[in-house]
Amino acid sequence: MTAIDPTAHLTTEQIEELGRELDAIRDEVIASRGEKDAAYIRKVISAQRKLELVSRGVLLFSIFPPAWLLGTAGLSVAKIMDNMEIGHNIMHGQWDWMRDPKIHSTTWEWDHVSPSEQWKHSHNELHHTYTNVIGKDNDLGYGIMRVDEDQKWHPFHLGQPLWNLINACFFEYGIAAYDLELGKNLHKRRRKNPEFRARAKAVGRKIRKQVLKDYVIHPLLSGPSFLTTLAATFTANLVRNIWTHSVIMCGHFPEGVQVFERRSIKGETRGQWYLRQMMGSANISGSKAMHFMTGNLSHQIEHHLFPDLPSNRYAEVAVKVRALFEKYELEYVTGPLPKQVFSAWRKVFRLSLPNKKPKVKTPDREQELVAA
Amino acid sequence: MLEMVTTPLLPSDYLDLVSPLRAGADLRGRIEAVHPETGDAATVVIRPGRGWRGHTAGQYVRIGVDVDGVRLWRAYSITSPTNRQDGRVTITVKAVLDGKVSNHLVRRAKPGTLIQLDQATGDFVLPQAKPAKVLYLTAGSGITPVMGMLRDIEFDDVVMIHCAPQPQDVIFRNELHDLVADKKLRLTEVHTATDGMLDIARLDELVPDWAERETWACGPAGLLDAAEEHWSEHGVQERLHTERFRPGIVVAGDGGEVTFSATGKTVDADGATPLLDIGEEAGVLMPSGCRMGICFGCVTPLKAGAVRDLRTGEITEAEPGVLIQTCVSAAAGPCDIER
């Protein structure tokens, strides 16, 4: 949290006007959703499936180094596509409007150890509602790190650069543990909670299926290429994990992103909610291919404003949203991937050490409302 | 075993990419051609998937068509004969005012497009035993199931009364007149734009022996209501078979807030709009069927609250195990639908 509130110059009336303008952007996209968008997601899904199939086919001969390289690269990309542009976005309900039961948030399952049902709860309901609210949004450091000066320091945080590195490598397991709220639920009393046990079982089943596919069946099918295929699927999962972790770190951790006090969101209006999403997210700039490989989470600000708009429309929305940032003199945090990743990592290192408590808080809108 | 390789997907997800019409796949069809019939009606030739089990003349099929990217389901009568050599089926669609699917099929559908199919269904069909005398009483697109019958089976004595605004609005007009020329059909066309609506009392004059004929009637509710009344009055209602394309909505009341608990959506609904439409509008995955309360393709558990049957006004309250037909039920106060 910066010492100066970057939204202090806005009156409550301006914030509501901002909200109305954002609503209008959203309505425009919803009114124009159609055949082209549907064709887009179907094309991406079809391409992903073909790429995965071909890559796994090539890996049957992974004993030959060129086949290993090609197959591993293809499988890594296929897994990233599955998790990001396809899975994450479908599970957000971005494509529910098509009413296709095969591409719907309630039926989709992804190539990931966290079952979609649990991920949807922790991600859609908690993170997207309480974005960057300390103590409410567990995405802020995932419960293992301190990513804001206002979060309380503990000697445990000294190791957070290492925790973050481990989390990056095994990110899908980190997510599964996080969706289970493992830290909280492993206390003796909660462990026996039947609801938690059922959820833990579901995760266990999903992990078993995923591990069996990637580390047993596919290598076995490769015959003499058993070991090289095993190395390939492990590498593809590792690449996917590090990539998704990096992209997601860039969404909320870089310098310039704001976090919020629990009490600051009490009685929050639509406009204020929008404003929090705007100030609590950061974008990644880059080419079309880069946006695609991040599942358009490079448009994190737009995604947080409109989580259920189809991802292929964020690029056009971003132009309008950015104009609003300028109009209301707000900082649009964005930068190329290496810069944002570096910025986020620097914060992880910096905040592993204690700091002096900052003096100024985000304004208490409640009081302001009373004053107005 | 194969599922262990494709998890979290199914092998069929991959097979669908190359062979969507194969045996064992979800039933689909491919549009092969669209032939205009009149200014606002067209016949769509569909190659059904391998799982298609055929139909009986007079039945309808539900199809799911993506219109502007949104999957919409509608039911259309099958107009092709059951023994068509190439295995294709045809439906004949009349574009109705504001009809999203009908206008799409008549004016914009392209050969090669995949559509979703259900098996043929409906009990507006001919009996096993051939009746001696037959009367077909149709109006507008109500001719479509009857055309399926005419093309399928020949009877010795067939009379048809068909109503359409003008001669050029008569779907299948050339084919009907060919049948007349071959003495296979006696046809009376009623052109409502010039002659006015058919007065059911004129039947005595048009078809003096109507009461002796096994009759199949299909058309707007006004015509069918009049026919049902007329046949009952003469005590021959068992000879009359009718097919309605739309449910007769008679009762509406106060609506309420509808929660779709599985999807986590809550919307306000009025007391006249079917919950099926409310859910679809909200992006909830609603199963749907005939949309007129007969096929039970849309039944959904009612978890809490109450709904009103739009055809009868009857109120159904939530109890464990209560299923409702969302296509003919509207909210009667707040309710929770398990979708």
Image: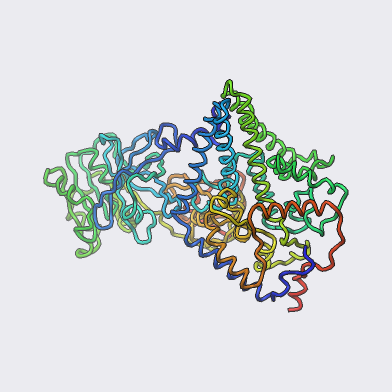
User: Which image quarter is the N terminus of chain A in?
Assistant: bottom right
B103 vs A291, nearest the viewer: A291
What is the residue that sits farthest to the bottom in this orientation? A372
Tell me, what colour scheme is on the image? rainbow
Residue B324 position in % (x across, y down): 53, 48
User: Which of the 4 image quarters holds residue B62?
Assistant: top left
Q: Nearer the viewer, residue B5 or B48?
A: B5
Coordinates of residue B112 in the picture (x, y in percent):
34, 44
Q: Left or right: where does residue A204 sit relative to residue B290?
A: right
The total of numbered circles placed on residues is 0
- Judge whether residue A79 can be spotted in this image: yes
Observer-nearest of A73 and B128 = A73
Q: Is B153 located above or below residue A230 in the figure?
A: below
Question: As displayed, is residue B257 above or below residue A234?
Answer: below
Q: Is residue A120 left or right of residue B24?
A: right
Q: Residue furthest top?
A: A224
Image position, residue A55 (x, y; %): 53, 34
Residue A69 percent location from the top left of the image: 57, 33
Determine which quarter of the picture holds residue A193: top right
* Lateral position of residue B150 relative to residue B93, left or right: left
Q: Is residue B240 visible to the viewer in this orientation of the structure?
A: no
From the viewer's perspective, is residue A82 above or below residue A96? Answer: above
Q: Residue at x 49, y 51 (%)?
A: A98
Query: Quick one: quadrant of the C terminus of chain A?
Result: bottom right
Report the front residue among B208 and A158. A158
